[in-house]
Amino acid sequence: MLDSPVLDKGGSPAAALEAAFRQIAATRMAGVSLLNPALAVEAVGFRPWREDWVGVLITPWFMSLICLPGADSAYASRSSGGKQDLALPSGDYEFLSAHEDALGHYLSSSLFSPLFEFPDMARAREVATAVLEEVFKPAPPEGMDAKLEQPLSRRDFLGALWR
């Protein structure tokens, strides 16, 4: 079970996640050259998944798939940077364990960093929504795997969503 002061209160953690990362943007990240000034902090599409909440977090410096584990989560608390697989409808994804005092432990899978190629929040939000649609799309039934002639790298997959 992960410690999560946000999820212990129930309901979507999106507002608390945004507040925590707006604070980080205003303090630890202030003045850092990796920031895209056209972007802001926004939690996109957070939805319950098993005992957890999964969505995309957009910040001026990264976009990541985030899992905020609930009180009854099957995922064990690990030190920041530890790797952990998370099974989502479309398959298994590798996440890194992280911790913020305002949030507790959570899991993060980087999608883009830095975000200079995003001209505005509308485009970033569009890509985040497309990522979530793909991640929550059920995998093909066993024995019905759709095979690509050449496997797509994560960069190619995300690039296709970007285009």
Image (tube, rainbow, N blue to C red):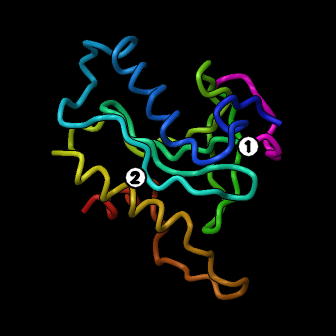
**Callout 1 amino acid:** Gly
Q: CA distance from mark 2 to mark 1?
A: 30 Å
Left or right, residue 54 beside residue 129: right
Residue 53 locus on image (x, y percent): 63, 49
Left or right, residue 19 beside residue 8: left
Up-down relation of residue 162 to residue 21 (above or below): below
Left or right, residue 105 beside residue 12: right
| Residue drawn 79% across the image and 40% down it | 71
Residue 65 locus on image (x, y percent): 51, 47
**Callout 2 amino acid:** Arg
Disc sitting over residue 155 in the figure: 2
Looking at this view, is 146 or 84 the one in front? 84
- Residue hosting label 1: 70
| Residue drawn 34% across the image and 16% down it | 26
How many C-alpha atoms fall within 10 Å of the one at disc 2: few (<14), some, or many (≥20)?
few
SS category of the residue bearing label 1: loop
Q: Nearer the viewer, mark 2 or mark 1?
A: 1
Residue 154 locus on image (x, y percent): 46, 54
Looking at this view, is 110 or 100 the one in front? 100
| Residue drawn 47% across the image and 67% down it | 133
Which secondary structure is most common in the magenta stretch? loop
Up-down relation of residue 163 to residue 83 (above or below): below
> Residues in magenta?
71-80
How many C-alpha atoms fall within 10 Å of the one at disc 1: few (<14), some, or many (≥20)?
many
Farthest bottom residue? 144
Residue 73 magenta-drawn? yes
